Amino acid sequence: MRLATWNVNSIGARLPRLLPWLEEVAPDVVALQETKCADAGFPHIELSALGYESAHAGDGRWNGVAVLSRLGLSEVSLVLDGHPEPRFASARCGPLQTLSVYVPNGRSLDDPHYAYKLAWLQSLRERLEQADPAVPLVVMGDMNIALRDEDVWDITAFRESTHVTAAERAALQSLLDWGLVDVQARPGKGEVPFTYWDYRAGMMHKNLGMRIDYVLATRAVQVRDAWVDREARKGKGASDHAPVVVDVDL
C-alpha cells in the first residue's frame, strides 16, 4: 500500500499539478491539507475519474483537509471536538484508519493563535485516545512543528519563534507517546529531507527548508520505504510544500 500526504496550498491552484502526480505516483491513500476550498467546489468528480473516493472539510478560506482513497472510504469524521475550523478529517481506507490534519500555524508566541495551536494539539491527542494503537492507523499532515533542531535549516533563525518551542515539540511528542512512530523519509543527497520551503528568496534552490509535514503510524503499519518528492515542489505552479510518500505493508 502506498500512502502520501501533501499540503497543496490551494487545491484549485494546484489541481493541474495534483492530478498528473496522482496518476504517476499512484498512492492508494492520500491526505491533503490547506485546500482553501469550500466543500461545494472540491474536485470530487476529477478525483473519482482517477479511482479515488474523497472526503473533504473546507470553508473556502485558508484551511481545508481531505482524505482520498482507492481502497474504499468509510467511518468518515470531519470534526475535531471543540474546534470548528476545517483542519481535521478521519476515514477508514480499507484496513487503515487515516487522519489528515492541518495543525494551526501559531503565528507568534504572544499571539492567541499560539495557545489555540496547543489546545488543538491537545484535542487531537484526546481524539487518539478513542482509537487503539495496536491497529493500523496513520496521522498524516502539516504539523507546523519541527520536532528536532535539525528539522529546520538553521535553528538560530527560529529562536523565540513558533514551530520549534518546547511546548509545541512536547505536544507532538505526546502523539508519538500514545503509540505512533515518526516515519523518517530517506535523505536526499545526504541532506535532511525537508518538506517545506518558503517561496521567497530562492529558499528551495538553497535548500533552506523545514520538515513540518509528517506521517505518524502505529506499529501495525510496517514501513518499507519513505521519501519526500522534491520534484513536485519544483517548477511553475508548485505548492510551497512537497509530498511525503510512504510504502507500507499491513
Image (cartoon, grey):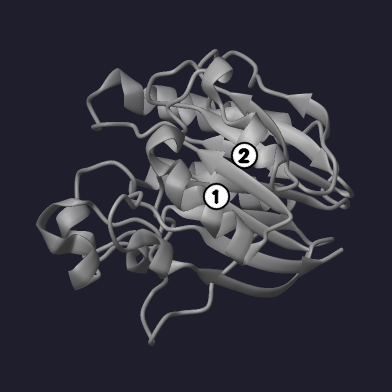
| Mark count | 2
**Can residue 34 be seen?**
no
Q: Nearer the viewer, mark 1 or mark 2?
A: 1
Amino acid at circle 2: Ser
Residue 226 is tagged as none
Q: Secondary structure at mark 2?
A: strand
Q: Position of residue 53 (x, y in %)?
A: 75, 37
Q: Quadrant of residue 203?
A: bottom left
Residue 100 is tagged as 2
Amino acid at circle 1: Leu
Q: Is residue 66 above or below residue 17?
A: above
Q: Position of residue 50 (x, y in %)?
A: 69, 48
3D distance between C-alphas at marks 1 and 2: 19 Å
Q: Secondary structure at mark 1?
A: helix
Q: State the residue at coordinates (33%, 32%).
A: 106
Q: Residues within 10 Å of mark 2 (few under 14, many from 20)?
A: many
For the N terminus, the quadrant is bottom right
For the C terminus, the quadrant is bottom right
Residue 19 is tagged as 1
Q: Quadrant of residue 123?
A: top right
Is disc 1 in contact with disc 2, using a CB cutoff of under 8 Å? no
Q: Quadrant of residue 180?
A: bottom right
Q: Position of residue 160 (x, y in %)?
A: 19, 44
**Can residue 157 be seen?**
yes
Q: Position of residue 43 (x, y in %)?
A: 58, 31
Disc with the residue nearer the chain's start (1 vs 2)? 1
